[in-house]
Image (cartoon, helix red, strand yellow):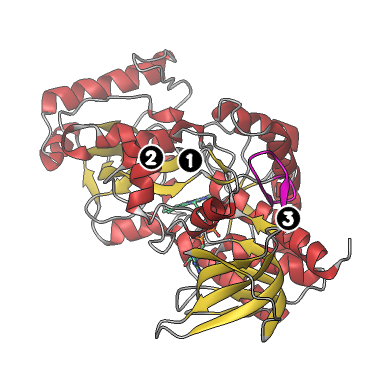
């Protein structure tokens, strides 16, 4: 990755707005720029748009949507912003958090109304840290459906997506105006394309082990579950341009990835009254704090694996997710009709597992807070058949990145914006602060879709000169 001096002569080919990366952020940027009458070119390294977006559950949090109203959920952007800031210990810039929370409903409804994405509200379990039910998902509850529907919307709009097109360099002039990009094809052929505005939507550095080791030493060598093509290109260009990098140690982990199958097991299995035990049959944490911080906690247990324990009622809720259905299909979900049988199947000591069950069920009955600080108040008792999945912790995606303002303009360390460079999704610093516990469920696609839309509008404004 490099930044080269812009040539004096015009590029042979040029497009007003170029977008690097065809994930959720890239497509939202492209669709919004196109609506503002800017010609757009998307450049994607892979032969098919997928990214981490396709690996996700495709859930986008938003407050005050018509989908919430439909099922009687009362929520506001201010409440949503407060939840994001509380989880992130007030580390992110409050003005940006409020701007994103304000525009989330508009973004989800824009995707639904203008681009035909059939969202519904996930309304049968609570996500940790959210004070209202505000996760919006597509029928399959999968990110693959999200990316395919976004791609179809871009096709309908006539937006060009150049595949197998890796952006390997930016051309910048002395004022740090981006004049164009260098594109490298799989056979090594290179082209230069001019632009008036550039959106970096090429996600973070989860797929770059050297950057993970440098910025997130805790996750050095941890399994990475995101898209391997997210190699930190935006961050590297930012460093070369003298842009400000923010919250580089922040990341979203997940403490519930089926092992060795590598399938995401929804945190609904925990939030609905399930719990995790280690190989000794013992609980070791307050699982309800969140799945992100749980990644490192799980990896620190003997063998780096633990078991999610739940029951058939909870499995029924989890089955709305394509990932969970896959986990069942590949045999990752173990079933037992008694605790003794479960202990045998998991090869954990029966006496400690039975004691753990008894403690959890007692906490549910009495509404007391357990030794780890978790409250099970109001939760259903587990009843046979019991279910369990052996899981591990993983790095899902990085939360640090290019510092931006609320127009998605990339900033310099002293706070001035670069003239025509924008960032969205995992390429930009997120709203989770600098530690994994700052990640509120949905922060990933929130900043991909909302900032993507904003970045597209801002880029179109610069490129067309129209407000
Ligand atoms: C298993 C899993 C589950 C998740 N579930 C959720 C969820 O339910 N809700 C949520 O909010 N978040 C979730 N996330 C996080 C979410 O997936 C990401 O935050 C989001 O997809 C980021 O979108 P993006 O557009 O920034 O990046 P991506 O979707 O990763 O797209 C980036 C694209 O840029 C391309 N690219 C990179 N470098 C270049 C280059 N130099 N030239 C050309 N192309 C390039 C890549 O190939 C890639 O296609 C999950 C993540 C994982 C891994």
The answer to whether marks 3 and 2 mark residues whose Cβ atoms lie closer than 8 Å is no
- Crowd rating for badge 1 (residues with CA inside 10 Å; few <14, some 14–19, many 20+): many
Does 224 appear above or below 144? above
Q: Position of residue 209 (x, y in %)?
A: 33, 52
The answer to whether marks 2 and 1 mark residues whose Cβ atoms lie closer than 8 Å is yes
Mark with earlier residue (3, 2): 2
Magenta stretch secondary structure, dominant: loop
Does 195 appear above or below 281? below
- Crowd rating for badge 2 (residues with CA inside 10 Å; few <14, some 14–19, many 20+): many
Bounds of the magenta segment: 405-418
Residue 131 in view, yes or no:
no
Ligand 1 within 8 A of label 1's CB? no
Which residue is disc 2 drawn over?
216
Mark on residue 454?
Answer: 3
Does 107 appear above or below 464? above
Q: Secondary structure at mark 1?
A: loop
> Of residues 120 and 433, which is closer to you in this image?
433
């Amino acid at each position: 990755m490099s930044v080269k001096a812009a040539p004096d002569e015009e590029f042979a080919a040029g497009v007003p707005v170029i977008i690097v990366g065809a994930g959720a952020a890239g497509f939202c940027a492209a669709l919004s720029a196109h609506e503002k009458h800017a010609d757009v070119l998307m450049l994607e390294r892979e032969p098919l748009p997928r990214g981490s977006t396709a690996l996700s559950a495709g859930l986008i949090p938003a407050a005050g949507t018509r989908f919430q109203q439909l099922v009687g959920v009362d929520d506001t952007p201010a409440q949503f912003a407060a939840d994001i800031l509380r989880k992130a210990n007030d580390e992110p810039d409050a003005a940006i958090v409020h701007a994103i929370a304000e525009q989330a409903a508009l973004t989800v409804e824009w995707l639904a109304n203008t681009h035909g994405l059939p969202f519904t509200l996930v309304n049968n379990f609570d996500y940790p840290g959210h004070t209202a039910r505000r996760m919006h998902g597509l029928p399959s509850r999968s990110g693959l459906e999200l990316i395919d529907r976004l791609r179809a919307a871009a096709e309908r709009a006539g937006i060009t997506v150049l595949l197998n097109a890796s952006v390997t360099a930016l051309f910048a002039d002395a004022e740090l105006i981006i004049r164009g990009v260098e594109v490298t094809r799989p056979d090594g052929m290179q082209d230069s394309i001019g632009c008036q505005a550039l959106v970096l939507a090429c996600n973070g550095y989860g797929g770059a082990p050297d950057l993970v080791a440098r910025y997130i030493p805790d996750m050095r060598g941890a399994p990475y579950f995101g898209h391997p093509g997210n190699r930190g290109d935006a961050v590297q260009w930012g460093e070369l341009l003298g842009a400000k990098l923010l919250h580089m140690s922040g990341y979203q982990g997940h403490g519930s990835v089926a092992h060795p199958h590598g399938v995401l097991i929804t945190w609904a299995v925990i939030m609905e009254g399930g719990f995790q035990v280690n190989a000794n049959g013992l609980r070791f944490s307050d699982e309800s704090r969140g799945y992100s911080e749980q990644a490192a906690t799980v990896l620190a247990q003997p063998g780096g694996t633990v078991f999610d324990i739940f029951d058939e009622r909870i499995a029924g809720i989890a089955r709305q997710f394509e990932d969970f259905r896959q986990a069942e299909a590949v045999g990752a979900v173990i079933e037992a009709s008694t605790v003794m049988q479960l202990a045998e199947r998991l090869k954990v000591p029966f006496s400690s597992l039975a004691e753990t069950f008894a403690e959890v069920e007692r906490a549910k009955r009495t509404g007391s807070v357990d030794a780890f600080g978790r409250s099970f108040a109001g939760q259903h008792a587990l009843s046979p058949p019991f279910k369990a999945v052996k899981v591990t912790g993983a790095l899902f995606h990085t939360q640090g990145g290019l510092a931006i303002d609320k127009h998605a303009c990339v900033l310099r360390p002293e706070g001035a914006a670069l003239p025509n460079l924008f960032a969205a999704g995992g390429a930009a610093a997120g709203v989770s602060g600098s530690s994994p516990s700052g990640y509120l469920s949905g922060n990933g696609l929130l900043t991909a879709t909302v900032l993507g839309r904003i970045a597209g509008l801002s880029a179109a404004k610069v490129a067309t000169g129209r407000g």
